[in-house]
Image: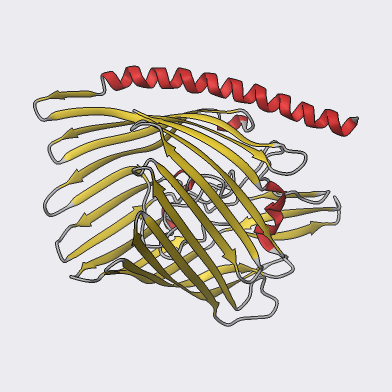
Amino acid sequence: MKKKWSKNFSLAKLLQRLSVATALFILAAFVATCICANRAYAQDELSLQINGFVDTYHALQSSYPHKVMSSRTRLRLEMRADYGEASLYSSMNLAYNSLLKDQTGAFLREAYFDYAGNFLEVKAGRQIVTWGVADGLRITDLISPMDYTEFMANDYDDIRVPVNAIDLKIPGERVSAEFVFVPVPEYFVMPSGEDNPWTMQLPERTRMDLSGTPEKRLKNSEYGGRLRFFLENLDFSLTAMRTFNKSPVTVASYNPKTDSILIRGVYKPMNVIGGDMSIPMGEFVIRGEVAEYFGEPIALANSTDYLVRNTFNALLGIDWYAGNNWTFMVQYMHKIVSDYRNDLGIEENSSMVTARISKELLNNTLKFSLYGMIDIDNLGYYVRSAADYLLSDQITLSFGADGFGGKRGTFKTYKKNTQIWVKGRYFF
């Protein structure tokens, strides 16, 4: 009887959260429609545009006890004011999250000044910086970190964290140059809190503190540059930057007085030299990235300390646009640790494979997609399947599932978080 009551209680909570979120979704859509009716204003050379979307997302654990994994609704407002070659852009989220209370409220996402001249382009403010050509993997794309509050069970664009930066570009038809300066770097947002089903479970008398990021001083700023070359059948870039490991390296220490363990995050500066390339070949596009990380921190296998090592990182991807609205994408990523020691927490050679398949039907109104990641060394996997149906030019409904598993590693840890989900989005 106790087990049956637990199931009914979870279902009741789910229905209650869905009803609240749906009501908020309808209200937000109504407000957005009213805004949309007056979104464009122009006088002389000044123009103002307001648009955005409303979406609602709900996920349920596929196995017992069928817990609600996520339940959130969001209104995204985007404003752009243009005056000649200059513009101001800002976006913010008005969010309601029934599970994570600190995710409810108004949050500024991006806000920057943009100037696009013939000889110089400037973007200054809170922005997302994207480098490289990889799909969902990070080789040279190291400036904007990731928000793993719900791990990977989110759209990739929503996982990216904006940074306060100055981005200078010298445009050109064949060659362009770019320099980025980030006075105060941002770091990965890791899942935390007892109410978050994505928070890692820790043993008794163990706590985690990942707040030890570098001081907000000029000496801890980030900066980097890249040269981009645009040839007839080849685009490639050369990159150099000074950055940090954005994902914390965790080390543990034991306190005999309190008989407790503290796990803290380590963030260290590292220099990066690399590049990327993209080659179109008929229906195919070949993509690649390479980078040498100088001074990357790596935890020991016993997690009591870390060592600094140089690592070589490479990625090769092939995209095939096969016709009839079929798309196939495959990537292989490899990491090599220099001066390897057997007591390091990772292998000397480690690999990751990703694959993406999509097919559009019914005059491109229905899209099926399958995305997967395979951690070769830990025999772990993550798979997301989705179906997106375009009800109109403004409304999209999506259904899908996320699966985790493996022998070792993070994907195995999240096996219990395998889930099904539904999402609705209204653009205005």
Q: Position of residue 307 (x, y in %)?
A: 62, 72
Residue 199 placement (x, y as % from top left) = 68, 45
Q: Quadrant of the C terminus?
A: top left
Q: Is 263 on the left-hand or right-hand side of 352?
A: right
Query: Which residue is drawn at the image coordinates 62% and 28% (left, top)?
Result: 98
Asked whether 133 or 342 is in front, the reply is 133
**In-front residue for pair 319/296:** 319
* As drawn, 53 above or below 401: above
Q: Which residue is drawn at the image coordinates 78% and 26% (left, top)?
A: 9
Instruction: Specify the quadrant that holds the N terminus.
Output: top right
**Residue closest to the far right:** 1
Q: Position of residue 170 (x, y in %)?
A: 18, 58
Q: Residue furthest bottom?
A: 339
Drawn side of residue 15 relative to residue 130, left or right? right
Quadrant housing residue 100? top right
Q: How many marks?
A: 0
State the residue in front, 313 or 254: 313
Q: Is residue 155 above or below residue 40?
A: below
Q: Residue at x 49, y 62 (%)?
A: 355
Specify whether residue 229 is in view: yes
Res 136 seen here: no
Q: Is residue 89 above or below residue 236?
A: above
Q: Is residue 166 above or below residue 399?
A: below
The spot of residue 164 in percent (x, y) is: 38, 45
In this view, the residue in front, 216 or 17, is 17
